Image (cartoon, rainbow, N blue to C red):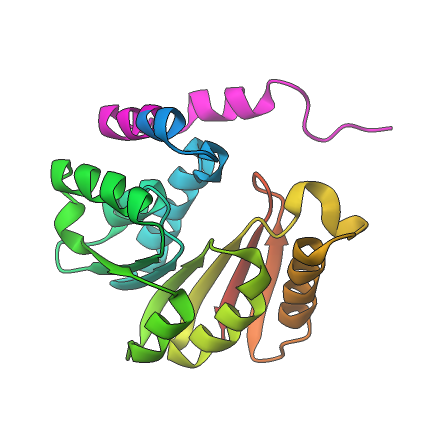
């Protein structure tokens, strides 16, 4: 069988990509030390990819659903112009405290506003329109998040959805979370109002553009 991604390829790709920088390295270390599921971090390659997407799309108004400890928000903030902003939604107060600590240390942290609480309730109160949306929160609500943000996304705007391959479990779903992600993937695939491609970056990224 042909192996498309050989062992060591991720490390090779990271070595040739823009580095994270000392602050993000510090954030990763603290997340690994203090959070129960540190693997929820976006990671080096995905973080650099998100920054590049913000830069190339020239987004100025971003919504993030699921901030965790702030790694992805800081990466996207790097790609924003000085007058750009990110509204990021998170329910975990421990994660919020860590994120805010690093936002305060970053020259880009002033571009980020944190909204604490259940994301669906928070989305209802936001006006938009957003240029760019990143979804990386509780998986059972993925389809609900997609439906909630699509009307608040501008024409030509982008939605990036993380973990849509779910460690390959989408090929043989067995539990509630598996089925929630496959349902989201089917929903996007059948949505004629968007252009879309499912990328095999890290644990899968759905790249969606509203027509």
Q: Is residue 193 left or right of residue 88?
A: right
Whether residue 211 is visible: no
Between 37 and 85, which is closer to the camera in this rendering?
37
Vertical position of residue 60 compared to residue 15: above or below: below
The image position of residue 136, as x and y in percent, is 47, 53
Q: Is residue 61 left or right of residue 198?
A: left
The image position of residue 27, as x and y in percent, is 29, 30
Q: Quadrant of residue 189?
A: bottom right
The image position of residue 82, as x and y in percent, is 13, 54
Vertical position of residue 29 compared to residue 127: above or below: above
Q: Residue at x 56, y 57 (%)?
A: 139
Q: Residue at x 18, y 38 (%)?
A: 101
Vertical position of residue 39 compared to residue 127: above or below: above
Residue stretch in magenta: 1-29
Vertical position of residue 159 compared to residue 204: above or below: below
Q: Residue at x 35, y 50 (%)?
A: 92
- The answer to if 179 sits in the magenta stretch is no
Between 61 and 12, which is closer to the camera in this rendering?
61
Quadrant of the drawing holding the N terminus:
top right
Q: Residue at x 38, y 65 (%)?
A: 118
């Amino acid at each position: 069988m042909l192996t498309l991604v050989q062992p060591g390829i991720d490390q090779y790709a990271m070595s040739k990509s823009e580095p994270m920088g000392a602050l993000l390295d510090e954030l990763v270390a603290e997340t690994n030390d203090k959070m129960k599921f540190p693997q929820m971090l976006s990671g080096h390659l995905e973080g650099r990819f998100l920054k590049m997407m913000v830069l190339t799309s020239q987004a100025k108004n971003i919504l993030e659903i699921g901030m965790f400890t702030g790694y992805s928000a800081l990466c996207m903030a790097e790609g924003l112009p000085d007058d750009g902003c990110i509204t990021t939604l998170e329910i975990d107060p421990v994660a919020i405290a860590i994120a805010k600590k690093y936002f305060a240390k970053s020259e880009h942290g002033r571009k980020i506003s944190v909204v604490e609480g259940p994301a669906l309730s928070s989305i209802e109160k936001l006006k938009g329109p957003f240029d760019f949306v990143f979804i990386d929160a509780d998986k059972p609500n993925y389809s609900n998040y997609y439906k909630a943000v699509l009307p608040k996304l501008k024409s030509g705007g982008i939605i990036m959805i993380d973990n849509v391959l779910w460690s390959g479990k989408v090929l043989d779903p067995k539990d509630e979370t598996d089925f929630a992600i496959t349902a989201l993937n089917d929903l996007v695939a059948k949505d004629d109002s968007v252009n879309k491609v499912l990328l095999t970056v890290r644990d899968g990224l759905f790249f969606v553009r509203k027509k």
